[in-house]
Image (spheres, grey):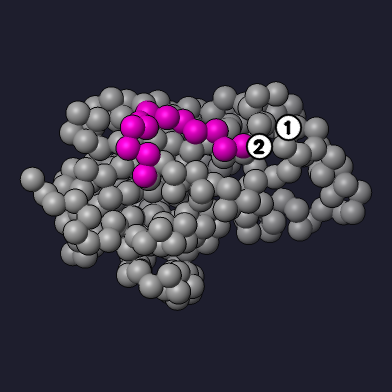
Amino acid sequence: MHEHHTTAPLAVVTGGSEGLGLAIADAFAADGADLILVARNRDKLLAAAGELGRHGTAVRTVAADLSAPDAPARIAAQVADLTDRVDTLVNNVGTAHFASLADTTADAMNTMWHLNVQVPLLLSQQLLPALLNARGNIINISSYWAHKMVAGRSSAAYSATRGALNSLTRALANELGPQGVRVNAIAPGAVHTPTYERSYLAPMTAEQRTAHDRRIEDSYPLGRLGTAHDIAAAAAYLASAQWTTGAILAVDGGLTVR
């Protein structure tokens, strides 16, 4: 029997260099976990590793573009060089293209299907021996768009991939539970990340911003957007919740109850 936690727990976080991934990695490191961060940009990775180093745990980085077909196998090979046990795998990388049905392209669909569904499945498959070794857990980052639609925003292709990720989470929880591996997902509401700021808020006029803020107050029972910390706290919970598997945890300020 593999002795558990003779060393610090180890978490692998994709998209770990900024936004939600970095916040999740930070919460894990604060709890004493060693980290392997996976992301495209080497400079952002090194900056993130420097920032997380203040917790005193080991932070290693793997620079890889997950949109490449062979990325999961190559990442797993690099992780295997660093460790033979993974306590938590966070499948955080994803992408969203919103388009009407008439304007949806096969390319956009394939890109989303690959990053949002295939990569979490293939990375889980590739890291399964290390997850089994640690009796670890997988956390998939999904979205409210799996089942909450918004008037005036067309999301069929994107919503389909999020629904698929939720189903994948439940099916893997069923399959891997008997081997001691838990599989859960977080479905965030809108979160104020650097990406949200850059692509959505920054271009707004003052009037648009006022309308946006009023819409948030109307849509969310808790009256605000999420923060990266809100999502990270949920990930820290799921990583340690020994009798929770197959859960799709809505962390969305109540958005999906309205």
**Nearest to the observer: residue 4 or residue 14:** 4
Q: Residue at x 46, y 30 (%)?
A: 248
Mark 1 lies on residue: 221
Amino acid at dot 2 = Gly
Q: Is residue 139 left or right of residue 105?
A: left
Q: State which tag comes first along the sequence, 2 or 1.
A: 1
Q: Is residue 74 left or right of residue 51?
A: left
Q: Which numbered marker is on residue 40?
A: none
Mark 2 lies on residue: 253
Residue 125: image location, x then y, percent: 24, 41
Q: Residues within 10 Å of mark 1 (few under 14, many from 20)?
A: some
Q: Which residues are magenta?
A: 240-252
Quick check: marks 2 and 1 in contact, CB under 8 Å? yes
Q: Residues within 10 Å of mark 2 (few under 14, many from 20)?
A: some
Residue 244 picture quarter? top left
Q: Residue at x 66, y 37 (%)?
A: 253
Residue 26: image location, x then y, percent: 47, 61
Residue 157 picture quarter? top right
Give the Cα separation between the discs numbered 2 and 1: 6 Å
Q: Residue at x 76, y 58 (%)?
A: 202
**Nearest to the observer: residue 66 or residue 4:** 4
Up the image or down, 104 lies above or below 47; here it is above
Amino acid at dot 1 = Pro
Residue 97 picture quarter? top right
Residue 251: image location, x then y, percent: 57, 38
- Quadrant into which the C terminus falls: top right
Residue 130: image location, x then y, percent: 19, 50
Up the image or down, 45 lies above or below 124; here it is below
Up the image or down, 110 lies above or below 83; here it is above
- Quadrant into which the N terminus falls: top left
Q: Main secondary structure of the magenta part?
A: loop
